Image (cartoon, rainbow, N blue to C red):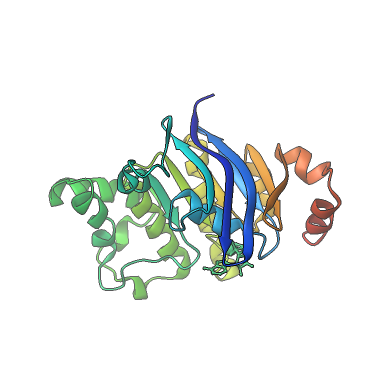
Amino acid sequence: MEKVIDVQHLKKSFGQHEVLKDIDFSVNKGEVVCIIGSSGSGKSTLLRCINLLEKPTAGEIIYNGENVLDSKHDIFKYRSKLGMVFQQFNLFNNLDVLHNCTVGPVKILKKSQQEAEKIAMGYLEQVGMGKFINAKPDQLSGGQKQRVAIARALTMEPDALLFDEPTSALDPEMVGEVLKVMKDLANSGLTMIVVTHEMEFAREVSDRVIFMDQGVILEQGAPEEIFYHPKEDRTKQFLERYL
Ligand code: ADP
Ligand code: MG
């Protein structure tokens, strides 16, 4: 199996507080990994360390056979290959939908505006937002904004997409449309790491589920194992809240 990202002995502290404690984590090409766990267990910090929005305190992140934490490594290029979708969308509110999706390809991938628009249109159609290219983010519902954010991430042709609770800020009636887009992406073979509290999604869509607890990966396995035969008491207690 080809590993897209391989994290070894990753640690992250904020001051005296060790938030990630010796995390080993890898994701294979085409794999969908869901990360579950209580609030404060370090899920967001792990994602943010993986794409270097936070600097790990120790450990290695191997990508294409190289440790991206080596000072020689081109961090900018690495980060452009990992798309990130946030709970709060993080769209550019001054730009319309189309231009939200062309900034990256033009500025970072050096595409022409025309070419970038063509690429953006393709992904906006794919997430069902092709009719909204002239709208500004504040004219859209939360579900629509998140679908634009996903299209925007895809325009960078990422090797993997990282999602941090992409449906947690949405009104309940909009969760489904975003999960549907994510499910289609998973089925298309995209490599995905998804932090989520949507247990049904995790069970149905993921190849592997990781349970994080107090800064460690307490257990991981196929969704059937984690959801129906969890080994650890903490995992059982956590999952009971969702039954
Ligand atoms: P989760 O996403 O699982 O809810 P987080 O990764 O957001 O957990 O947070 C894990 C712990 O790290 C929490 O105790 C949180 O307060 C702490 N933490 C996260 N980011 C920072 C930061 N920038 N500075 C200090 N502490 C932080
Ligand atoms: Mg979080």
> With respect to residue 99, does 62 lie above or below?
above
The answer to whether residue 92 is left or right of residue 11 is left
- Residue 17 placed where, x, y %? 63, 65
The answer to whether residue 217 is left or right of residue 185 is right
The answer to whether residue 182 is left or right of residue 116 is right
| Closest to the observer, 127 or 64 | 64
The residue sitting at the right extreme is: 233
> With respect to residue 79, does 17 lie above or below?
below
The answer to whether residue 38 is left or right of residue 180 is right
Question: How many labels were placed on the picture?
Answer: 0
> Which residue shows up at 57% across the image and 67% down it?
15
Q: Is residue 181 visible?
A: no
- Residue 123 placed where, x, y %? 33, 48
The residue sitting at the bottom extreme is: 138
Q: Is residue 30 visible?
A: yes
The residue sitting at the top extreme is: 1
> With respect to residue 131, does 186 lie above or below?
above
| Closest to the observer, 21 or 175 | 21
> Which residue shows up at 47% across the image and 64% down it?
143
> Quadrant of the image for the C terminus?
bottom right
> Which residue shows up at 36% across the image and 43% down it?
78
State ligand 2's quadrant. bottom right
> Which residue shows up at 37% across the image and 59% down it?
148
| Closest to the observer, 115 or 229 | 229
| Closest to the observer, 105 or 203 | 105
- Residue 140 placed where, x, y %? 38, 71
> Quadrant of the image for the N terminus?
top right
